[in-house]
Amino acid sequence: MEPSKDHDEIGAVLRQLTQAYADHDADTIAAAYAPDAVIYDLAPPLARRGINRDAVADWLAGWEGPIRIETRDLEISVDGALGFASALTRIQGRQGGEAQDMWFRSTQCFRNSGGRWRIVCEHASVPFYMDGSYRAAIDLQP
């Protein structure tokens, strides 16, 4: 199937987010989400509704220099006013004086409202070792 205008627009939102993380731009990050978006993030709690711009700014402030985001195996599907993007995502940078480099799984559901695609549900996760340690498998790479 040929990529559509909708695929391109969702891809543009994802590229804007990648740049916003690099630039520590909390306003652009928050603007990509619907006000009542369901978020299943890597950090606690298990779930939340909506994104808090100030909490994003506080989190970004904990990183020294740009936060680099890389995606692999990105797939975008669109059906009407709903779109889904899934990928393996890598985050790299320096946080708390330590180099960070981790791959995780990410899925975003987008809704087009008023001609604008916004994230209405986001899920990010890492697998865990099922050997009884329940340790997050942050050492995995694609």
Image (tube, rainbow, N blue to C red):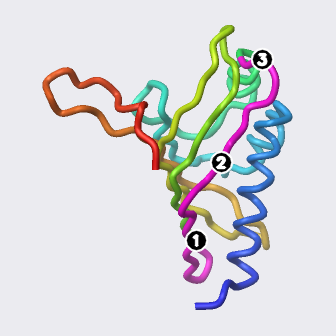
The residues tagged by marks 3 and 1 sit, at their Cα atoms, a distance apart of: 31 Å
Q: Is residue 30 above or below residue 95?
A: below
Predominant SS of the magenta segment: strand
| Closer to the eye: label 2 or 1 | 2
State which mark lies toward you, 3 or 1. 3
Mark 3 burial class by Cα count in 10 Å: few <14, some 14-19, many 20+: some
Q: Which residue is located at x 68 percent, y 8 percent?
A: 97
Circle nearer the N terminus (2, 1): 2
Q: Secondary structure at mark 1?
A: strand
Total tally of numbered discs in the picture: 3
- Of residue 42 and residue 98, the one placed in the foreground of this image is 98
> Which residue, given by chain and number where applicable, does mark 2 sit on?
70
- Image point 65% across, 48% down: which residue? 70
Residue at mark 2 to residue at mark 3: CA–CA distance: 18 Å
Q: Nearer the viewer, residue 49 or 107?
A: 107
What type is the residue that disc 1 sits on?
Ile
